[in-house]
Image (cartoon, rainbow, N blue to C red):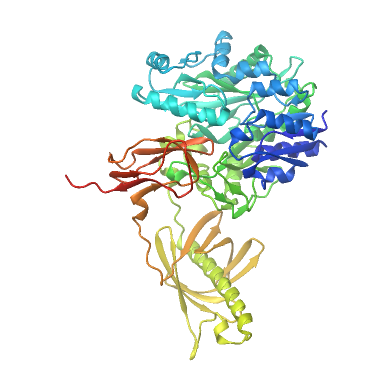
Amino acid sequence: MFHKLLIANRGEIACRIARTARRMGIATVAVYSEADKAALHVEVADEAWPIGPAPARESYLSIDKILDIARRSGAQAIHPGYGFLAENADFAERCSQAGVIFVGPPPNAMRLMGSKASAKSLMERLGVPILPGYHGAATDEATMSAAAENIGFPLLVKASAGGGGRGMRVVRRMSELAAALESAAREAVASFGDGRLLLEKYLLRPRHIEIQIFADAYGEVDTFIERDCSIQRRHQKILEETPACGLSEDMRREMRAAATTAALAAGYIGAGTIEFLCQDDAYYFLEMNTRLQVEHPVTEMVTGLDLVEWQFRVACGEPLPVKQDALVMRGCAIEARICAEDPARDFLPSIGVIEHFRKPGESATVRVDTGVRRGDRVTQHYDSLIAKPVVYDGTRGDAIQRLQEALDSTELVGVATNLDFLRALARDPRFLDGSYDTGFIEAAGDELTVTHTSPQDDMIFILAAATAMWIAHLRERDNRAAREIGDPWSPWSQCDAWRVHGRGYFGLRFSLDGEIHCARVLPHSDGDFQLDAFSQSVIVVATRDGDRTNVRVDGVKRELGIVRRDDGCVVILAGRNHHLHLIDPLLPAPNETAAERSLSTPFPARVTRVLVDAGESVRKGAPLVVLEAMKMEVTLTAPRDGMVAGVHCVEGETAREGAELIELVDEAPT
């Protein structure tokens, strides 16, 4: 076994690999870009080496830099994680040439199965069903157009290398093909450094089922019980479970046999995943991921095994730790991916500083894999994944209940996330009864993004917590004033609403979800206060305990989280964020329509396409600009009908957050 490992990745998977290495007594070397110098994976490693600027192509995708650091640090092995260089056969080959163990499959097997085109050809020869498609070498527009005509619509444009939903576009008619090819190729190059594409028939309502395999150098192959990864947005998985609900034993057996056959035919060694689409009692080979998967924890939960440890041992030439006949798989496990994105805005990525992060308590049945902590910055340069709560129980129903509890007890403030979306999903009847497919989220429409309305009993606690926070802020201010004037007994240094004829009330106004909430407050000398709101008059006592605030309203206690901001606060109740903005009566009301006069960058991003010219008329929802951020392309659309008065960006430039891209004006009446 090697004694020192370089982890050629970042974030959650780098932390995950380091955890197993530490348990096994293996020293770890982290690499980090300029954007990641304070990242968690840098902190948890034994050593950390800078690798270059923030863009992945200049840091995490640089084979020369990674191998140089391996040499200089004395690392005997490299684990590529997933994403970046994890499925790059040239990288695996370069590691071997440098005398460094590559914790992954052999380069030849990776080339054969990592390319979707060659993998489909192999599986077709082996008699495994594949979807109609085109995966030839020629990818010019004329060839692809002819192939698309032959396949029929709808079809899918896919990156031949890599995975994770990157470089995938659904094409429903010929007129969309050229733009889809161009966009998918750009995203594939940004994510994997390889812009090759293929075409595939698009099934409307399939299930996405995958088989985890493990093979050693002695011809042994283990297949694990399948994972259902059908719940996806943007062709990227956000919830996975094992075993698949309602899958027939015959189909389960056939897919596992096909996975074993593929691994043996490819001369595969190490961890991999064979993915299938299932529809109408038929299954089709989709692709192979020649690496560890993001969702590998659910397999670990039902087996009690550490698949990263297996990777280490097999990479060193050891046989599989457990043979197929001895594998024991029990119960049900589910993983949810918490991402920095806004489901209400078509899953638009979000960046910013994580101001508050509280994970559910971990145990034998609940685990949380993450690569961030409070104070970290989510940037536009990398994937939006923040954390993965993974739960286990003996039955699917009990596992779902644990998932709901884990999501409800997760708190995260600072960036927009899909937490509320996942909570709604975990309670949706279609998920509960297992009757979902890859079109589930699209079919649900806005059902999963409906704004949660808090009952009045909750609202009084939310408003009480915000008021308590604001009173504490005033006390801090007044204590500073008292120290400055040197008279702590001065009435001007107290925030008790003192008046000449006795105590008095003061008023606070907060906006929450577009509604104005007014409160009349009478502070008491012992720290509690009277709050008049929602036609009620209650006594509030609030005490701080670490990152929690205990609020008593007329003696009834509830625990909340509060994150203070300059213009108000975020109150967290039962895991849900309530953004309260303190309204200053001396300031003018904001111009509600100002944001609609232009299209601005929601985060720093590279402009990849400008789709309009000055003078064009556009309708609300029309695509205007395509941005690249978080390893994906995002299309910004017109917020309203109007005319493009000005275009203030050019393709290829990097726009700062908030920069005006397109200026819109009302069209002159005709």
Q: Position of residue 358 (x, y in %)?
A: 63, 53
Q: Residue at x 48, y 13 (%)?
A: 138
Query: Can you say whether 548 is above or below 77 in the image?
Result: below
Q: Which of the pair 636/311 is nearer the observer?
A: 636
> Which residue is more in the foreground, 190 or 266?
190
Residue 234 appears in view: yes
Q: Nearer the viewer, residue 275 or 408?
A: 275
Q: Where's the N terminus, which quadrant?
A: top right
The picture places residue 321, in percent across and down from the top left corner, at 78, 25
Q: Is residue 582 left or right of residue 559?
A: left
In the displayed structure image, the side of residue 600 where residue 642 appears, left or right: left
Percent position (x, y) of residue 620?
Answer: 31, 43
Compared to residue 30, the image places residue 157 above or below, namely above
Name of the residue lying farthest toward the left: 670
**Residue 661: x, y in percent?**
40, 44
Q: Is residue 528 above or below residue 424?
A: below
Farthest residue, direction bottom: 501
Which quadrant, please, contains the C terminus?
A: top left
For the question of whether residue 306 can be seen, the reply is no
Residue 277 lies left or right of residue 25; in this view the side is left
Residue 382's quadrant in the figure? top right
Residue visible at 47% across and 80% down in the picture: 505
- In depth, the one of 331 and 257 nearer the eye is 257
Q: Number of callouts in the render?
A: 0
